[in-house]
Image (cartoon, coloured by chain):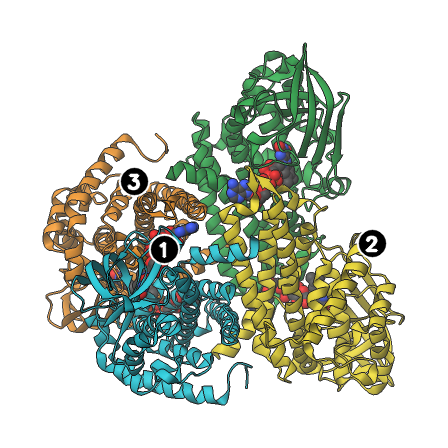
Chain colours: A yellow, B green, C orange, D cyan
Amino acid sequence: MRSPYFTVEHDVFREGVRKFVAEEVAPNADLWERDHMIPREIWRRMGELGYLGINHSEAHGGSEADFFYSVVFLEELARGNMGGFTAAVSVQQYMATAHIAKAGSEDIKQQFLVPSIEGQAVGALAISEPDTGSDVANIRTRARREGDEYVIDGAKMFITNGYYADFVVVACRTGEDGASGISLIVVETTRPGFKARKLDKIGWRCSDTAEMSFDGVRVPVSNLVGKENHGFYYIMESFQLERLVGAVGAIGAADYVLEFTGKYIRERQAFGRPVARFQTIRHDMADMVTELAAARQLVYHTAWLYDQGEVPVLECSMIKLKAAELCNEIIDRCLQCHGGYGYMEEYPIARAYRDTRVGTIAGGTSAIMREIIAKMVLD
Amino acid sequence: MRSPYFTVEHDVFREGVRKFVAEEVAPNADLWERDHMIPREIWRRMGELGYLGINHSEAHGGSEADFFYSVVFLEELARGNMGGFTAAVSVQQYMATAHIAKAGSEDIKQQFLVPSIEGQAVGALAISEPDTGSDVANIRTRARREGDEYVIDGAKMFITNGYYADFVVVACRTGEDGASGISLIVVETTRPGFKARKLDKIGWRCSDTAEMSFDGVRVPVSNLVGKENHGFYYIMESFQLERLVGAVGAIGAADYVLEFTGKYIRERQAFGRPVARFQTIRHDMADMVTELAAARQLVYHTAWLYDQGEVPVLECSMIKLKAAELCNEIIDRCLQCHGGYGYMEEYPIARAYRDTRVGTIAGGTSAIMREIIAKMVLD
Amino acid sequence: MRSPYFTVEHDVFREGVRKFVAEEVAPNADLWERDHMIPREIWRRMGELGYLGINHSEAHGGSEADFFYSVVFLEELARGNMGGFTAAVSVQQYMATAHIAKAGSEDIKQQFLVPSIEGQAVGALAISEPDTGSDVANIRTRARREGDEYVIDGAKMFITNGYYADFVVVACRTGEDGASGISLIVVETTRPGFKARKLDKIGWRCSDTAEMSFDGVRVPVSNLVGKENHGFYYIMESFQLERLVGAVGAIGAADYVLEFTGKYIRERQAFGRPVARFQTIRHDMADMVTELAAARQLVYHTAWLYDQGEVPVLECSMIKLKAAELCNEIIDRCLQCHGGYGYMEEYPIARAYRDTRVGTIAGGTSAIMREIIAKMVLD
Amino acid sequence: MRSPYFTVEHDVFREGVRKFVAEEVAPNADLWERDHMIPREIWRRMGELGYLGINHSEAHGGSEADFFYSVVFLEELARGNMGGFTAAVSVQQYMATAHIAKAGSEDIKQQFLVPSIEGQAVGALAISEPDTGSDVANIRTRARREGDEYVIDGAKMFITNGYYADFVVVACRTGEDGASGISLIVVETTRPGFKARKLDKIGWRCSDTAEMSFDGVRVPVSNLVGKENHGFYYIMESFQLERLVGAVGAIGAADYVLEFTGKYIRERQAFGRPVARFQTIRHDMADMVTELAAARQLVYHTAWLYDQGEVPVLECSMIKLKAAELCNEIIDRCLQCHGGYGYMEEYPIARAYRDTRVGTIAGGTSAIMREIIAKMVLD
Ligand SMILES: Cc1cc2nc3c(=O)[nH]c(=O)nc-3n(C[C@H](O)[C@H](O)[C@H](O)COP(=O)(O)OP(=O)(O)OC[C@H]3O[C@@H](n4cnc5c(N)ncnc54)[C@H](O)[C@@H]3O)c2cc1C
Ligand SMILES: Cc1cc2nc3c(=O)[nH]c(=O)nc-3n(C[C@H](O)[C@H](O)[C@H](O)COP(=O)(O)OP(=O)(O)OC[C@H]3O[C@@H](n4cnc5c(N)ncnc54)[C@H](O)[C@@H]3O)c2cc1C
Ligand SMILES: Cc1cc2nc3c(=O)[nH]c(=O)nc-3n(C[C@H](O)[C@H](O)[C@H](O)COP(=O)(O)OP(=O)(O)OC[C@H]3O[C@@H](n4cnc5c(N)ncnc54)[C@H](O)[C@@H]3O)c2cc1C
Ligand SMILES: Cc1cc2nc3c(=O)[nH]c(=O)nc-3n(C[C@H](O)[C@H](O)[C@H](O)COP(=O)(O)OP(=O)(O)OC[C@H]3O[C@@H](n4cnc5c(N)ncnc54)[C@H](O)[C@@H]3O)c2cc1C
């Protein structure tokens, strides 16, 4: 073994996911990207294969595997070279349902978590709004209580899975201004007054990022996740998992792009020899694999801490920052290695390039990561 | 005046172009980009306005203006925020027709240059091939002489204006291997045996970049530009103009993006104040405007040398390198300033981001620029 | 001519300074650096040669040359590869005496400016204090008026020429807190109560940077420069010249280091060929000369604006930022090109390395430059 | 525990070394640096404390501790803020004696290893020569066999401990040109014909880096380490340990500098608040700790591989590259955080700055690391 973190069982699992991605995901990329849609069959298929439950409790159909199974799963998903798909799965499995799994009532779990694990339901998590993204405590979508119901008014922005989802975990203001007046409420997308609009993006095209409006949407109070006005704390805690998951995806993507770029430059000829023989390109590759190796070890270390039951806020913020920035940089330089072909949509690097760019924005921008890190090391 | 390079007349001209771009180019961007096509009317309109001839001789319908008119023109075109359009015009005016203007016979000039200046004809310049881009001396498209004709066989790749052009200046092998066996030959796109295929790209979407095949295409020997087997030297010389033009476009684009990003961050609020109040963003902006100011002065200096009749190979290579790399970096950082909106196609930064990326590739990659510069300063 | 800024006369002047530096400055570097002292003879010699007056009025013994003579002078001084010497001269000529020349009474000019131009007197400018450097408005050295005298108490820090100077232009608090209570007062270093201590530094070793204490130092009120409580505005204005001068020195130094490094790598062999044949080193050199060329043009442009009578705050801040940062970076990379020899004091790169590092600190840190630039472009 | 690599025992050991460094090393730094000499007492003291044998066999007086004890030891040495001392110890313990321990005869071990572990003898390792550093296979110092002796002629350059050492392990050419004709031979510095000259350096001042000349130096053939003409392979293998050791030192140094810089910026005031409150400085710190955390995990991972008995060439090259480059960058930015004080020798950052710079050169330059990495990932 070349790492204290992985066992043979992880390797076996990896092979399975790799095969699945190569045979059932990657070949469909062009289609899903063109349609701006991930079809339901693939969710069901992942449910069938048990992938959507590796991080969930056996009681609800999951397998409660250690977190390095998730690491493997997310690294391998990245080999589909479709950031939007990785994002969609990550949101479903580690964000939307994570809240429900962590703080939800058994009823809510039965209603939303179980079918999500089965791949029968797809979820979204809606925090950001048109006027506020980084400043989570400032959201304005309001849920006021009327009898046994919440009545929700407001808007959400940039919500992954937001157009085709069955349910959305929505951060709503139920109390006073600021962090201590926010709750998480599950909203079924069939509820009257809910509307969503798909957004056209640079990348993550298969992923249905949506703007949502809530116009007097009514849901039963039992749709509340956890305690009222505790939403901000749930969100802050779950951000750690989200960022860890995002970081794993980023190193997976960078790794895959380096792999096919290495192949390309060994084959492409210029001035009578493979491009991979030019020293500047060689040293560039050396720098990139080195940076990636370092980022990877920090990601694994963080995953290990997480698996030990810690909430490693500092490390999660660091890997989100580092992995996302690095992934952008690596893919940018790999595109350059492709010369003119790098700019052509026919080549996989083009999609990788369009997809990666959101990594330093979604899930908290790099600036926000630096804010958290600085606070933790300086104050 | 705040620069020794520009006069009041240049400023007046600038206002005219700015108005034209704002009223007749920018509003059509979405359409042209969707259609992957620049309509003929706009070419004719530019012909009418005299823009397409500012760098050409009065004898052929141009105005022989000093080069800083071209600088102004290209800087202003960039404000259309449509890199593909700037590219198309640049190719037409400073590349395809430049060869004809420089080395072509009077006949060829009448046939291709005059209507190009009028906006009645559109030209392309085809050097790169599927198997060779950086290594120009290695092209393989062959033109063999048969009586009064050249018969051309081969393929060209990544040719701007290549799909809708009326004529293409094609680099062909007419002699031995290497640099000394290349000629430039004009090929009308209506000639039998010529075929073109549009390529789908990350950006420059309105621009019809094409792969071309020549299957026994016959043109009269009078279509030869300049002397047989002198093509490589023509190309090398004209690269300087191409790179200067590209660099001007790059600083124009960077400048424009900085302008609208500045506006965005002054308006966008987070944590109770405009994003433009965060020191990290402020210093980022400061670095960017500083780098741009430096690049700009080097571009102007190079334009001045060019205007003095020099062929400033070193400076042209330096500004191509610097301006293209910087433009990428600035636009990338400006996208980041936009947060999630930066990733949305509805915002101008998204197209700018997709467009700029080709700048360090087309017209000679950054690596090739560094090769030239190093040769000139070290050997 | 390859630049609109320089004439043949400038070139002739350049040759003179170059010879002077090569013959009378550079050979003494080791000695002066070891002694942490610049001997008086060299000041007198420069006075004799007229160098110390190129930017001063003919009425006081100067030659009132256009500013590009100063550019030439400072670029050439840098070829002495002794940052401390360039700094000492710059302070004398463009800082300490500049205030006197600009706002001083004729009396003060006769007393301090005239001998400074002759190289008979050496001046310093003392603004920074132990507790405040960046925040100029916050200085605490106090001058209270007693009859016809000012009585000065306080301390100054990091003052160039501060140990061997004959006179010091001292920023003192004469009024209220903040920017509007500061005055400039000339203090002769022979006055009782004045003490100075030399500081040991990473570089600039020949330059006598000093910590000063003022313990009831009395000077006549006629030693006031300009108007009382107007000091802050004088300082802010003169910072522009100081920064322009610093930027010219930085590009001069970078240029010189690139020159001798180029020579070194062409001679040094590794793996059977000159180190200058390795592509990574070549491209590094290409990047460096490109960046320097861009910075240089912006510096010249700024000098031109200055020479036109403008106070180009934005441009001065930009070139101070860019030239100082770039000079550090270039010299760092050039050291790397030297391999192990780069770390040895026997090689000129070692001193260059130690000297350059202060460039982003003295004269206002890079952060302060970015603050100014951001304010001007964003607010 | 927050890491799978360290145990409580390591922590206890760490405390001991930290105390030793704080009490017996750091207070002497100014003296040793001024004298360009590390006194013998400190070697003997380290011998006494058992430190010099943690990586050596019990049979020769060592403690055969796992490699993470060496990691702890080297990290803590760095807190002495004296790169030259860390270097001297590293050479003694992990380079000079490492060859002897690995391939030497029992006789040689008794003669040189045992007293080295006791701190009674100090060793050096001499590979580099005036004309060749990176290109190890090209060394020219020749040892020809005469009866029972080797007669050595040639010169060595940049040899750490080279002036005060008792013995030097010298790479000599005993056979043909190139890699396969090199042997390692121990030379006592008392042998006639051996001379050494101390070199004056930017940093590592306490360390006696020397140029050596061998003028017919005779040593018994029993001084050969391992097999004749196998030297290159010994060197290549031992480079891995050297680079691992260097990388640990680099992260130790970076960590320590970040610690005291953090303290400085929390205390230093500007514009009415601690410098640590400025966002740009905060984000800078955040970037640095993040990069360091990533590098650190890769270093630990490599140490783990090494401890498992692997010879992790790729990882050792990566961490040497990354840790040395990063340490330079971090210390440079930390110096900037100090403002003017950062340039003063009175502050610890000044020595750290001068010391760190050699990190990307000694032990193989960054370019050579990139060469190795590229070869391993691309060829
Ligand atoms: C494709 C995509 C998918 C997404 N999916 C989801 C989802 O599923 N659910 C969801 O809730 N959200 C989602 N988001 C939203 C995402 O989390 C936000 O876009 C992100 O947090 C940034 O918020 P913003 O867009 O409002 O940027 P803003 O907060 O407006 O930031 C604008 C700029 O200001 C900077 N900035 C802000 N504050 C500071 C500061 N204090 N200091 C320095 N700089 C600062 C930012 O770094 C950025 O550069 C998604 C976004 C995208 C693009
Ligand atoms: C949108 C677009 C429009 C274009 N328009 C035109 C046009 O109108 N007419 C035309 O003729 N061409 C055009 N081109 C082609 C363009 O000029 C080439 O793509 C470019 O010169 C690079 O060539 P290549 O794509 O073959 O890359 P390659 O030459 O295959 O280069 C691949 C990689 O190797 C690197 N490399 C190559 N040689 C070296 C070396 N010696 N040292 C180090 N690295 C090296 C490159 O930098 C690059 O990173 C266009 C390209 C694009 C993308
Ligand atoms: C060799 C040398 C010669 C000098 N010569 C002279 C001289 O002749 N006369 C003279 O008056 N002075 C002189 N100086 C002083 C010099 O001008 C100051 O050192 C400089 O202005 C920085 O001030 P400081 O050292 O107090 O740093 P501080 O102001 O304490 O700054 C510490 C750090 O905080 C940062 N910082 C400060 N404010 C901000 C902010 N708002 N936002 C972000 N970051 C911030 C700085 O960039 C720096 O990184 C000299 C200094 C040196 C080293
Ligand atoms: C303080 C100090 C202590 C040292 N201690 C020891 C010691 O104890 N024992 C010992 O044997 N040596 C020691 N060294 C020597 C050190 O190992 C060499 O300096 C180092 O290997 C570089 O060799 P060089 O100096 O000959 O540089 P060169 O090999 O001359 O390199 C010059 C430049 O060329 C570059 N270069 C070389 N080859 C290539 C290539 N193929 N591609 C791209 N760039 C290339 C290098 O990166 C460098 O930038 C020490 C050096 C120093 C400075």
User: Mark 1 — residue?
Assistant: D181
Residue C48 in the image, given as x and y percentages of width and height: 11, 43
Specify the quadrant of the image occupied by residue A129.
bottom right
Residue pointed to by mark 2: A35
- Mark 2 secondary-structure assignment: helix
Q: In the rendering, at what x and y percent does residue A197 appear?
A: 81, 60
Residue C148, given in percent of the width and then of the height, sits at 14, 67
The quadrant in which residue A42 appears is bottom right
Co-location on one chain, circles 3 and 2: no
Lateral position of residue C100 relative to residue D296, left or right: left
At which x and y percent is residue C252?
31, 46
How busy is the neighbourhood of tag 3: few (under 14 within 10 Å), some, or many (20 plus)? some
Would you say B366 lies left or right of B349 here? left
Q: Amino acid at mark 1?
A: Gly
Work out whether residue D113 or residue B108 is closer to the camera in this orientation and state it.
D113
Residue C68: mark in rendering: 3
Amino acid carrying mark 2 in the image: Asp
Label 2 crowd (10 A; few <14 / some 14-19 / many >=20): some
Report the side of D299 relative to A155 (left or right). Answer: left
On whether disc 2 and disc 1 are found on a single subunit, the reply is no
Proximity of marks 2 and 1: CB atoms separated by less than 8 Å = no
Question: Disc 3 residue type?
Answer: Phe
Residue at 44% x, 70% y is D244
